[in-house]
Image (tube, rainbow, N blue to C red):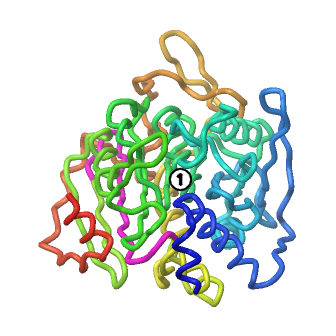
Amino acid sequence: MRRACFARLSGLGRFCVAVMALLLAPALLGPFATAQAQQRSIAFQGTTRDYILHVPKNLPPGPRPLVIALHGALQPAGIMQRYLDLDAVADREGFVVAYPKGINLIWNDGRSSVAGFLPILDARDDAGFVLAVRDELVAQGLADPGRAYLMGFSNGGFLTAFVACRHADAFAAFATMMMTVPVGYAETCRPSKPVPILMMNGTYDPIVPMFGRPTPGARLMSARDSAELFARIDRCASSQASQLPSARIVRYDSCAGGATVAYYEIDGGHQPPAQSVDAGDAFAALLLGPRRSGLDAPNEIWAFFKRYGTPAQPEALPDAGVLVTVNGVAGSRLAAAEPMPLRPGKPAAGKPTSGTSASSTPAAATLASVPLPMASPLRRKAASAE
């Protein structure tokens, strides 16, 4: 009976039901509350936009690293906050987290449709809104502009990739979960600097299949091709692979500007992996595919993020005779396509904090042959279709 009813739904209907299952599953676990969560509003382009801010207790004074996390389609930001459990990492590591809210729970993510399934009726600038949240927190002295990071899940992941291609200078590193980039990005993605990025995809993802598919407004690349696109953009010289019980990880190293592209192929569905799973995750798995335990998405992402970025310096750096302040001042993002000349001894923003430059780093040795995980039924189906 359930299968018959589900089969009668359109593709859009199945998508919406699946996402609603994702929304409801964490809510079944009990009320969501956090003493450090602040509901905030910001004036943006003649309207009021909202976001949630999480500030750990007992932070030392001064600007802190900032992670902006973007929810998926039809997923309230508060549910994303509860579902991802990024706040626990923030409390331990001492960074602040902002959860912007999409209008009607959806982002205009750079495709010529909203979230890949609705026509664009209001071409709002959601990328600009994300940048405005960053700039407001920088101007308030709460966020360090040299250590700001952007991540997103599903629809929010698409918007994250869009921002990485067009506003790479605003963030030190990026991370996407359950997203593959539109084919057109091979021509249009021209970031102003190398883009450190971590990408996670599920081998059994029925919403954003890892082998790519057409969506209204854009045809999507495969997950591996998406990672390789950023590896080409970053001019990475080598790659190495490693195998975990439920994931295969490919890292593209020796990239320009010290960047790295990390691709996580998770043996799971349209759910980021977590330290542990529960009944809510099992319920969502009925339509979204399994959520794997052991590998924790927010911990992996933060471990990647904190390698990049440098604390803001009070002095200004010269650029063609123009002084550009890199202290906490709104609107101080650099627009130059080429890196600015640095004073001796100052690492470039976006490089690993170890200070090793790309020109002095030898190509990483490629690991010995690593056995691939068994291909998922979705992947075999795609291969036979082609």
Going 46% across and 43% down the picture, which residue do you hit? Answer: 350
Going 58% across and 84% down the picture, which residue do you hit? Answer: 2
Q: Is residue 107 above or below residue 124?
A: below
- Numbered marks: total: 1
Q: Position of residue 334 (x, y in %)?
A: 55, 26
**Quarter of the view holding residue 381:** bottom left
Residue annotated with mark 1: 157
Q: Is residue 323 above or below residue 314?
A: above
**Quarter of the view holding residue 242:** bottom left
10 drawn magenta: no
Going 59% across and 17% down the picture, which residue do you hit? Answer: 323
Q: Position of residue 351 (x, y in %)?
A: 42, 45
Q: Secondary structure at mark 1?
A: helix
Three-letter amino acid code of the residue under disc 1: Gly
Q: Which residues are magenta?
A: 253-270
Q: Nearer the viewer, residue 196 or 178?
A: 178
